[in-house]
Amino acid sequence: MTAIWDIAVLGAGPAGMAAATEAAQRGAKVVLLEESPAPGGQVYRAPPPGFVMPADADRRAGDGLRAALAASGAAQRLGVRIWGVGGGPLVPAGEAPAPFRLDGLDAEGRPFDLTARALLLCTGTQERIIPFPGWTLPGVMGLAAATILFKAQGMLPGRRVVVAGAGPLLYAVAAKLLKHGAAVAAVVDLASHGEWLRALPALSARPDLLARGAAWRAQLLLKGVPVHAGARITAAEGDAVLEAVRVQKLQGGPERRIEADSLCIGHGLVPAIEASRAFRARHRYEPGLGGWVPALDAEFRSTVPGLLVAGDGAGLRGAAAAPASGRIAALAALRDLGLMSSATHAVASAPHRRDFAQAARAGGAMAAMMALRPALVAAIPPETLVCRCEGVTRAAIDAALDEGALSMNQLKQFSRCGMGPCQGRLCGEAAAELLARRVGGREAAGFATGRLPLRPVPMDALLGEFDYADIPVPAAAPI
Amino acid sequence: MKYDVAVIGAGVMGCSTALHLARAGMKVVLLDRGPICREASGVNAGTLTMQMTRAALIPYALRAYDMWLRMAEWCDGGHVLATACPGLSVAFTEQEAAMLEERARIRAAAGAPIKIVSTARAREIEPGLSPQALLAGHCPMDGFASAYLTGRAFRPALLNAGVDLREDCAVQGVDAGFTLDTAAGRMDARRLVLAGGVWLGEMAGWLGVPLPIKTLINQLVVTERMEPVMRTVLGVASGLLSLKQYANGTVLIGGGWQGIGDNTRGGIAVKPESFLGNVRLAAHAVPALREARVVRAWLGLEAETADALPAIGPIPGVADAWIIGSVHSGYTSGPYMGRILAQAILGEAPELPLFPIDRLLAKEKAA
């Protein structure tokens, strides 16, 4: 592909689908890139070809977005793994910004690259799991991971499941488990009843969400599932696989042991900012939006010209707000590229900005429920692994901090925390919080410099077939 | 209070100089605008090889090699997991073979125990080596370190020696009386050591000394942990590959391929063609790397003078001001360079000669 796209959209969740649709409908040359085999993202994930699953509300909303996308003429590159981002401001000093460049492996694992004048990141979130004893046992998985199992494979995570953590996903997963015949041994919610009640006013604008939430709760009640509010998992236990979990109220007190073969646990969602970090865009720390988010203007432009960020990756506001943010960003990109007049832009953008404001209010209340809880980090025992890739315990992190690590980059060097295949996606939140307690906050702790590849990439696919003579070896250093 | 010496730049050069000066009784302040050893000293390939070292630096590198391997003994237990192993530098074409033989001869004359061996012998030493190699230079004295541990290794020893370590404390300028304008206020010193890596040129400018320093943007790539695929430090005749597998199974691929960056922004981006070229060269040398997954690529900034030889010595025309840096493969020789500069500052004769910068300034005036 040698042609330059007007806009490349990375990630085909609700924000990315809507953005690509909007831009393509208005005549732009748009390519939408997605890691999964079909567009949809996590909430609106499509089942794989050949799977017949009953359509629920999420599926129907997703199908609507997918149909509009298919009709829009936007090019879709699905099942691709984008590992490299470049161009834009990432050019030698004194050179004008270049077109954005994406490097990836296609669905067959072959390398490709493409260039675009504007890049819209709709890369969503990753799950936050604050470590606790036993969290790496087989049988323990993320709440969001459990929803992927349901939606992508029609599989249940276990037969007798404890669902734990924070936010609406907790009840969504528990209800789904019940519906498909698993036993839910308990729901362990970090939030108290009072916290949920305080979130209600913000949700009143979304009666559909309220009704659905109420239905989930009713099912739990009906099946007699115990709900432990204001409580946490203190340990997962088992010889080789999960056998039981321990539950305790946040304020302390006796521990309760609950037998289970699966624990689905999530402590909220964190915007996935690998790509915007790689571009050295400015970020700010917003706990209510999930943590570090790119600094954006009202139309989702980052501090890097031509680079925009929409959807939950711009800050948690939920799937309902995501399409509006995608459309606002796409329209901003069209105007900035000179493909749309200011007058047309103003008219086109206004309704989406209203939609976004309304949906973001409810989404923001849910995001607040999922914000990081420092008490969980404080409770990590010394011998518990924080970085599972590199086997770094809480005690090892504390030792590195005692020896003077002052930033996330330095903590990574002193301890190897975050150096493994996940590149800090799993351990970063807990490690940063441990550091933040020493240096006076997450802003002071910073985040590790964004590095490529965005995902581990197989050498074999990159290398291809080559002749030694064709390797452009630079001139030898002097002897 | 007046410090006996202010060392600006807390990389391996600055740390070693400061440590040796403090242990000799001087009151030392060591300043860095960032954390200790967070630039080149903390992100380089950790290669302790003679076969990429410039011939003129071999005597220094041999002594530094010993210092790295025994670091815990002289650094209050601090160490960088330095590991001794054989080193191979290989040739894949006739032209490279000629270069390899010539360079091995020159480095051997400078004191490095390098011998040319056949491919068969080289593959006994390194079973992971591709049979396509034509011949190899073999140096039994080789090895590698985990450069990311350098700051952690130096820090306790510096503090034990009484060094006033000021991290995240940028120096904005220095006046003729050696009053430093820093982020933490003014500081006074009797002597000054500039140890600022690629920023040495700007620092020399504070003293009115025009010292051109070129910035190299060196690329590094690391794989996921994998089964043992190699057991040497492996390079190529041109010096544009360095490969080693650490005890944890990760393989580090370097060699000085260039990325995008500068002194202001740091190393900001990998060049796709450099990335591909570097990993292809690596997989050509060790075919088993095809099975690896690349986890991370990054960039480090290396300083280079006009003649690519170090800038270590007094600063001409400015009494009691010293400079240290721009050492090719500087990490390898770093701790020793700091030691001999400290000797000179203390008024002793350095064990080996310094690299005064008069030669570089003269060229600047002529130009």
Image (cartoon, rainbow, N blue to C red):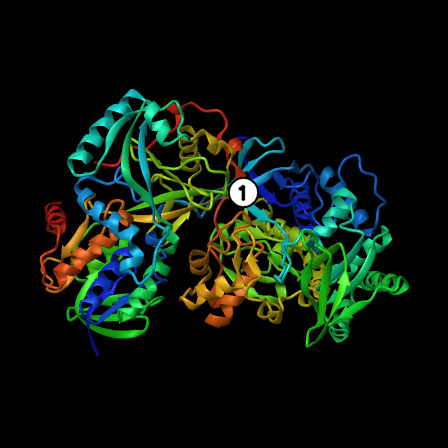
Q: Is residue A29 visible?
A: no
- Residue A108 position in % (x across, y down): 62, 30
Seen in the picture, residue B96 relative to A152 is either above or below; the reply is above
Residue A430 drawn above or below residue A230: above
Query: Could you tell me if residue B342 is visible in this image?
Result: yes
In-front residue for pair A261/B332: A261
In the figure, is residue A92 to the left or right of B55?
right
- As drawn, A244 above or below B213: below
- Does A168 sit left or right of A349 as displayed? right
Disc 1 secondary structure class = loop
Residue B51 in percent (x, y) is at: 26, 37
* Residue A413 figure quarter: bottom left
Q: What amino acid type should be assigned to the residue bearing mark 1?
A: Pro
Q: Give residue A42's position: percent from left, percent from top.
A: 70, 49
Q: Mark 1, residues whose alpha carbon is within 10 Å: few (<14), some, or many (≥20)?
A: many
Residue shown at 68%/42% (left/top)? A25
Give the residue at mark 1.
Answer: A456
- Does residue A390 appear to the left or right of B90 in the view shown? right
Residue at image coords 51%, 54%: A418
Quarter of the image where the N terminus of chain A is located: top right
Q: Residue furthest top?
A: B94
Name the quadrant containing residue B245.
Answer: top left
Residue at the right extreme of this rendering: A222
Could you tell me which chain the residue with mark 1 belongs to?
Answer: A
Quadrant containing the C terminus of chain A is: top left
